[in-house]
Structures are given as structure tokens and as C-alpha cells.
Image (spheres, rainbow, N blue to C red):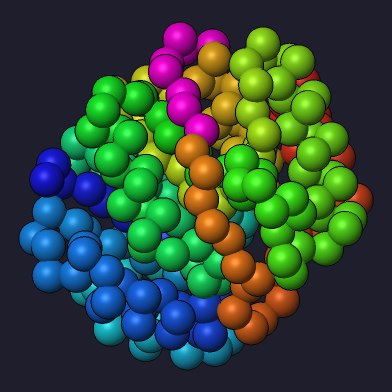
């Protein structure tokens, strides 16, 4: 397998990370030397997320001077550039996506896609169990606007699982600081002419903790990012 860096931004996600520890250890990726897990720990983290993350990786990046998911990814990419791998995966730390889904993303990258995102809405079940109606509605609206803006159908703009080849990572310069990250990624894939593929993935409700997403405020910021990118 080509080498893969899995970047996981973290703020108070102890329970989600405990799930990921067990999930990773039971997956095909465990003990695979081509897989490198990289955790970015927000300096405001107040639980034992750091100690749990160390059970999976020695690569712990302190997010200093900035806050937010997009800023964490930016810092991790700068570290990645010092020793780049052919593939990069962004994975939420809350345990809502499994490493089986990461394997599916890597498989599509191996087939030639520049970018792959996991969609929670391509499975026949409809609204995923545990997803609030307001988050479901907001994501559907933002996904529709992004599809029109980018002239590319996307069913799940706000997914927490993305994968890229190194060409795509080097070809975009991430500017987002927060949850508008995914809207920027979708837009820049279109602007740079990269091949972006969505795949169906299973999703489950976050494992403990509270969602950092503020529906109205962050939804407006995401909308602005769609329109600007």
C-alpha cells in the first residue's frame, strides 16, 4: 500500500478517540507501516484526549496560536510537507467514522481519484440515525448550493472524512479556520480541475462530548465560503 498520513484534529474528544483506538486496532490498517496517524491537539483541550491519542501515534502536534478545525488542518499540512506521503486523509476525532471507511477512501485514491469524500447520504437508509433534523436540513441545503456553485453534484458537503493524493494537497492552499473547511475543499477541487469522487460511508452518532458546530453561525460562514471559493 502507498504511504498514507491520516490527520485527526482534536478538541475534547476523549470518548471519540477511545472508540478510534479500538476501531483502529481491529482494522486491517493496524500494524501496517504505511499508515501514519497524526493528531493535532487544540490547546484549549481540557480532557485526556492527548493521552488517548498517544495510544495510537507518537505524532502529536500542538495547535498553538490558532483555533478551529481548518487551522488545525493547515498546521498539520505544514508538518506533512516536511515528509510528504502519497495520500492524506482528514478524519474527525469524534468516532462517527470508522477506519473501514478510511480504507474505502484509500481504495478510491488508489484507483486514480485526486480527492475522495465520504457521504452519509448515498446509503438507502435516509437521514443517518443520531443526526439532528436541523443538521440534516442544513447540510442538505449547503450541499445543494455547493453543487450549483461548483457545477458538481455533492450530496454531503459537511462530511468529516476526506482523502487526497499529494498532487491535490500541494495544489490547494487552505485558508479556512473553522468548519468552512469542507466548503473550501469542494470549491478548490473544482477550480483546480481535480477529480473528486464521493463514496457511501457508514456514519454513527458522535461518541460523547458536544458538537462544536453552531448551526446558524457556522452555517452562515460555510455559505459565505461556498460563494467566495
The picture places residue 76, in percent across and down from the top left corner, at: 37, 51
Quarter residue 148 falls in: top right
On whether residue 195 falls in the magenta region, the answer is yes
Q: Residue at x 26, y 78 (%)?
A: 25
Task: Please state which of residues 221 and 101 is positioned toward the viewer in this rendering.
Answer: 101
Q: Is residue 9 among what the camera can see? A: no
Q: Is residue 224 visible?
A: yes
Residue at (29, 43) in percent of width and height: 106
Whether residue 211 is situated above or below residue 68 in the rendered picture: below
The answer to if 210 sits in the magenta stretch is: no
Q: Is residue 155 left or right of residue 161?
A: right
Q: Which residues are magenta?
A: 191-198
Residue shown at 74%/50% (left/top)? 126
45 on left or right of 76: right
Above or below, 129 against 102 in this view is: below
Q: Position of residue 161 (x, y in %)?
A: 49, 49
Amino acid at each position: 500500500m502507498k504511504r498514507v498520513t491520516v490527520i485527526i484534529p482534536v478538541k475534547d474528544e476523549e470518548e471519540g478517540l477511545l472508540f478510534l483506538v479500538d476501531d483502529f486496532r481491529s482494522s486491517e490498517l493496524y500494524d501496517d507501516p504505511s499508515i501514519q496517524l497524526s493528531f493535532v491537539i487544540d490547546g484549549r483541550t481540557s480532557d485526556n484526549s492527548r493521552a488517548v491519542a498517544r495510544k495510537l501515534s507518537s505524532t502529536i502536534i500542538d495547535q498553538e496560536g490558532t483555533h478551529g478545525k481548518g487551522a488545525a488542518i493547515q498546521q498539520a499540512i505544514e508538518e506533512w510537507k516536511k515528509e510528504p506521503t502519497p495520500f492524506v486523509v482528514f478524519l474527525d476525532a469524534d468516532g462517527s467514522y470508522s477506519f473501514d471507511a478510511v480504507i474505502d477512501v484509500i481504495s478510491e485514491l488508489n484507483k486514480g481519484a485526486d480527492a475522495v469524500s465520504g457521504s452519509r447520504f448515498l446509503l438507502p437508509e435516509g437521514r443517518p440515525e443520531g443526526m439532528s433534523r436541523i443538521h440534516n436540513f442544513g447540510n442538505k441545503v449547503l450541499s445543494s448550493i455547493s453543487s450549483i456553485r461548483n457545477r458538481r453534484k455533492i450530496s454531503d458537503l459537511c462530511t468529516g472524512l476526506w482523502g487526497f493524493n499529494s498532487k491535490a494537497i500541494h495544489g490547494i492552499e487552505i485558508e479556512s479556520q473553522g468548519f468552512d473547511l469542507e466548503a473550501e475543499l469542494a470549491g478548490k477541487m473544482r477550480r483546480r480541475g481535480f477529480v473528486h469522487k464521493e463514496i457511501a460511508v457508514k456514519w454513527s452518532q458522535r461518541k460523547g462530548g458536544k458538537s462544536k458546530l453552531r448551526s446558524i453561525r457556522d452555517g452562515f460562514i460555510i455559505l459565505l465560503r461556498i460563494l467566495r471559493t
